[in-house]
Image (spheres, rainbow, N blue to C red):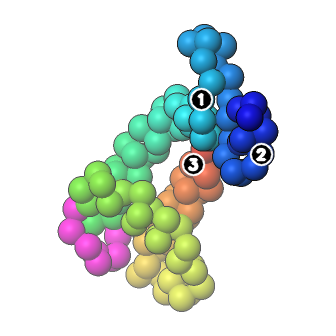
Amino acid sequence: MPVRDMSDALGIAINWNEELRQVEVGAPPEERNENAEIVDAKYLKIFTDLLNRREEETRFAIHPIVPEDDAFMQAKMYAGFELKEYESDPSYASTVVWLKEMKQAWADYTAERSK
């Protein structure tokens, strides 16, 4: 039975790898997205700096200084915060500014990451 017919019958993808001049069974390996790695590295620094600054400048001292592996998780969490409850209280002015910066950084990150 030809390989193409076998793949159709079994529902398994096959691909011809011209570089190696061979048939590959299964989905092709995902290409490494170098742009995503560059974007992640750039925003890891931005998020880490913003999160570390939170402790120093705002009344938003919920977590200790953020280790890098938590930066994306916490950035996403803070980007989802509603500002209404903080905007009406002048003592939270620096917190509101910080949250707006985080929201913008998260929006920029997701836009760049989706390119």
Q: Nearer the viewer, residue 7 or 24?
A: 7
* Residue at image coords 57%, 48%: 109
Q: Residue at x 49, y 65 (%)?
A: 76
Q: Amino acid at mark 2?
A: Asp
Mark 2–mark 1 distance (CA, rounded to whole Å)? 14 Å
The vertical placement of 2 against 75, above or below, is: above
Give the residue drawn at x 60%, y 18%: 22
Q: Is residue 103 visible?
A: yes
Magenta segment's dominant SS is loop
Alpha carbons under labels 3 and 1: distance apart: 35 Å
Question: How many neighbours does mark 1 have within 10 angstroms: few (below 14), some (14-19), or many (20 or more)?
Answer: some
Read off the magenta span.
Answer: 57-65
The residue identified by callout 3 is 109
Q: CA distance from mark 3 to mark 2?
A: 40 Å
Q: Is residue 107 left or right of residue 54?
A: right
Asked which quadrant contains residue 52, the reply is bottom left
Disc 1 target residue: 24
Q: Are marks 2 and 1 in contact (CB under 8 Å)?
A: no
Determine if the magenta segment contains residue 61.
yes
Specify whether 24 is left or right of 55.
right
Residue 35 visible to the viewer: no
Q: Which residue is mark 2?
A: 8
